[in-house]
C-alpha cells in the first residue's frame, strides 16, 4: 500500500498534533508549579544538599539529569523519585 500525499494535505493533522502536545506540556507545567526541571544548584538546594553532593549522586547513577546545552537539568519527577528511594 502506497500513499501519495502532499505536504499541504498533512498540515491540518500536524497542527492538531502540535496543539495537543503543547496542551499536555502546559498541563504538566501547571501541575509541577510551573517548573519541569531545575539546574544543579537549585535542585541541590531543594533537596537540602550541596551542589557537589548532587553531582556525585548523578555520577554514581543514583539520579538522572538531562543535559541542556552545557547545563545539567534535573526533572522534577527525578527529584521526587530520589526522595522516595532515600526514605526506604
Image: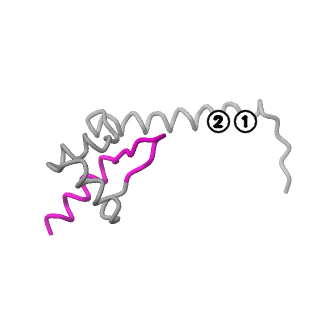
Give the residue drawn at x 72%, y 36%.
Answer: 10
Residue 48: give x, y in percent of width and height.
14, 48
Q: Is residue 69 magenta?
A: yes
Give the residue drawn at x 53%, y 32%.
Answer: 19
Residue 28: give x, y in percent of width and height.
36, 40
Instruction: Between residue 23 and residue 73, name the one nearer to us.
Output: 73
**Numbered mark located on residue 28 in the image:** none
Count residues near mark 2 (Cα–Cα under 10 Å), then give few for <14, some for 14-19, many for 20+. Answer: few
Residues shaded magenta: 65-88
Instruction: Between residue 1 and residue 50, name the one nearer to us.
Output: 50
Give the residue drawn at x 82%, y 35%.
Answer: 6
Quadrant that contains the C terminus:
bottom left
Count residues near mark 1 (Cα–Cα under 10 Å), then give few for <14, some for 14-19, many for 20+. Answer: few
Instruction: Between residue 70 and residue 67, name the one nearer to us.
Output: 70
Circle 1 SS class: helix
Q: Which residue is mark 2?
A: 14
Q: Is residue 84 above or below residue 23?
A: below
Q: Which residue is mark 1?
A: 10
Give the residue drawn at x 19%, y 57%.
Answer: 83
Amino acid at each position: 500500500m502506497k500513499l501519495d500525499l502532499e505536504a499541504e494535505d498533512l498540515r491540518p493533522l500536524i497542527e492538531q498534533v502540535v496543539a495537543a502536545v503543547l496542551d499536555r506540556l502546559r498541563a504538566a507545567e501547571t501541575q509541577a508549579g510551573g517548573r519541569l526541571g531545575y539546574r544543579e544548584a537549585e535542585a541541590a538546594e531543594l533537596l537540602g544538599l550541596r551542589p557537589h553532593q548532587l553531582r556525585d549522586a548523578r555520577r554514581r547513577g543514583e539520579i538522572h539529569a538531562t543535559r541542556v546545552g552545557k547545563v545539567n537539568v534535573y526533572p522534577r519527577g527525578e527529584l521526587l523519585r530520589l526522595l522516595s528511594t532515600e526514605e526506604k
